[in-house]
Image (spheres, grey):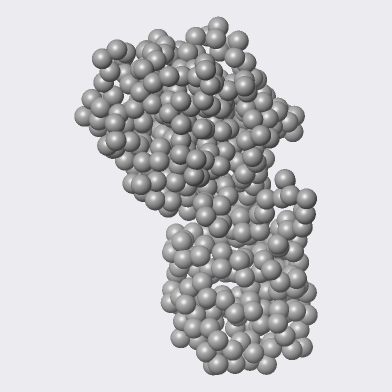
């Protein structure tokens, strides 16, 4: 998809479709009023007929435009004639993008950049237009013989005045970087597990490193991890024929000795549950248990494209969790890299075993903060649904920064408590801790487990089990939380200037 800022007068812009907003009570946005005047009152006639009430997200496509170089006009409802909330703005843009997926339309000019949005500037609005159109038009074709996509869209123009071009272009560039990163994340996550193995993820990281001079890649093999003593991580791969990998991406965009931000993404390329086998129904979706890994790769790509003045480390512990004669057994005792011992009560609680050794490993980078992200617990989906990701951590400032970034990025999170009382649920008679805490508060006890390996770190944990992919008829990866993490990094870089 190509994106551009269009500063020509609307009446002179030749395009396949122009998107303008209309409010309730037949009130027109500035661009809609201009087009109405130049088309013999066409938009007012449509409103008078009652074809659109102006309710937020409503759309009407006008296919015949008299005396105009514009072939079509898409009217989008904005609700009441006042500043929109950020979510209502994104809803309106999404409705427009979804409406234009199927018609034979290649070049669209979006005038919704002129709409007032509470607390948001033109740069933010331009960025959202790019991100939304990219998200709506994404289609997985990698393993299909027919590569034809549903959408014919090739170019999106964002309308702006000449004196607004710098801000609009800045938003476009940010949006394009994040949109490309989200598409990378979706593509990796949507691949089947027989293609996207730990070795495949490592190869993708190496290819990404070849594209950016500031990004270097190193891969720890199982022999390296065994030498280090990563007993928890290596225990997960024992049941698989695919060797585990610990992938490290090192982006050096900041000052040489400044402490890095470390991102850790769970990379279970397939999770059958091990000996504690998952039910067969829906197990195909366990290819998505590496969405944290995919999001770290995507976020590192976005940071490199935006050339952020930060040092960032991405760590991806990757494995499969399969049943086998050498797989973890319930009751086994593992020794982690930290030296702490773990009793395995459920082999399907394996993601935390990958993450705990990686958290300990991250200490060698002397990080400023560490953020891990994982499709960790079904309990998070029960608690929060598919709207926010779960957020837990041991540092209020870091968690507050992530909450603020989530608001800007429209990539919601909700903070859950990490109280000491929950730690009691992880008690074991035979090891320092158990790998599960029972049926209650599963998301919190999983984070409690991880917190025991983050005692020396400023750390936050994102449970994305409910937000990383959609199920049902629209099954597929969402690319979350790339937008959130990218915004957090943008904010951090801005704070240094």
- Compare residues 23 and 247 and report the one nearer the observer: 247
Number of callouts:
0
Residue 49 visible from this viewpoint: yes
Residue 287, percent across and down?
Answer: 57, 38
Is 375 situated above or below 131? above
Residue 195, percent across and down?
Answer: 68, 35
- Compare residues 360 and 39 and report the one nearer the observer: 360
Q: Residue at the location (49% across, 44% down)?
A: 281
Q: Residue at the location (46% across, 61% down)?
A: 87
Q: Which quadrant of the view contains residue 71?
A: bottom right
Q: Which quadrant of the view contains residue 73?
A: bottom right
Q: Residue at the location (74% across, 64% down)?
A: 152
Residue 79, percent across and down?
Answer: 46, 75
Is 276 situated above or below 65? above
Q: Is residue 85 left or right of residue 324?
A: left
Q: Residue at the location (77% across, 53% down)?
A: 147
Is 249 situated above or below 25? above
């Amino acid at each position: 998809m190509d994106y551009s800022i269009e500063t020509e007068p609307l009446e002179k812009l030749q395009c396949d479709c122009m998107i303008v907003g209309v409010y309730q009570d037949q009130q027109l946005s500035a661009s809609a009023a201009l087009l109405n005047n130049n088309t013999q009152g066409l938009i007012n006639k449509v409103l008078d007929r009652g074809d659109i009430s102006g309710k937020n997200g409503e759309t009407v496509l006008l296919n015949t435009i008299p005396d105009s170089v514009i072939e079509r006009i898409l009217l989008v409802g904005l609700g009441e004639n006042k500043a929109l909330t950020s979510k209502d703005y994104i809803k309106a843009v999404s409705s427009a993008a979804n409406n234009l997926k199927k018609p034979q339309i290649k070049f669209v000019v979006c005038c919704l950049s002129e709409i007032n949005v509470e607390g948001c500037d033109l740069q933010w609005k331009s960025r959202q237009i790019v991100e939304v159109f990219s998200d709506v038009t994404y289609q997985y074709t990698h393993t299909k013989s027919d590569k034809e996509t549903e959408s014919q869209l090739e170019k999106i123009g964002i309308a702006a005045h000449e004196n607004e071009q710098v801000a609009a272009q800045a938003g476009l560039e940010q949006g394009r970087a994040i949109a490309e990163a989200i598409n990378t994340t979706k593509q990796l996550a949507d691949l089947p597990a027989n293609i996207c193995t730990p070795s495949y993820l490592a190869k993708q990281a190496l290819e990404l490193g070849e594209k950016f001079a500031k990004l270097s890649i190193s891969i720890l093999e199982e022999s390296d991890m065994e030498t280090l003593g990563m007993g928890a991580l290596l225990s997960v791969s024992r049941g698989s024929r695919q060797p585990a990998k610990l992938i490290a991406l090192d982006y050096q965009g900041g000052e040489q000795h400044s402490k890095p931000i470390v991102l850790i993404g769970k990379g279970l390329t397939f999770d059958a549950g091990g000996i504690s086998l998952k039910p067969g129904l829906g197990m195909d979706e366990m290819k998505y248990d590496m969405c944290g890994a995919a999001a770290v790769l995507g976020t590192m790509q976005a940071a490199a494209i935006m050339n952020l003045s930060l040092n960032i480390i991405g760590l991806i512990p990757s494995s499969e969790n399969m049943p086998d004669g050498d797989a973890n057994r319930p009751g086994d005792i593992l020794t982690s890299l930290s030296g702490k011992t773990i009793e395995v009560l459920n082999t399907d609680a394996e993601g935390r075993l990958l993450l705990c050794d990686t958290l300990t490993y991250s200490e060698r980078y002397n990080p400023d903060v560490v953020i891990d992200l994982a499709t960790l617990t079904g309990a998070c989906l029960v608690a929060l649904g598919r709207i926010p990701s779960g957020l837990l951590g041991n540092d209020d400032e870091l968690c507050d920064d992530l909450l603020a970034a989530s608001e800007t990025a429209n990539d919601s999170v909700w903070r859950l408590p990490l109280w000491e009382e929950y730690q009691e649920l992880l008690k074991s008679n035979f090891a320092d801790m158990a790998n599960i805490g029972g049926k209650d508060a599963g998301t919190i006890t999983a984070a409690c487990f991880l917190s025991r390996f983050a005692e020396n770190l400023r750390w936050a944990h994102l449970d994305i089990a409910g937000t990383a992919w959609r199920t049902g008829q629209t099954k597929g990866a969402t690319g979350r939380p790339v937008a959130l993490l990218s915004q957090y990094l943008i904010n951090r870089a801005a704070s240094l200037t």
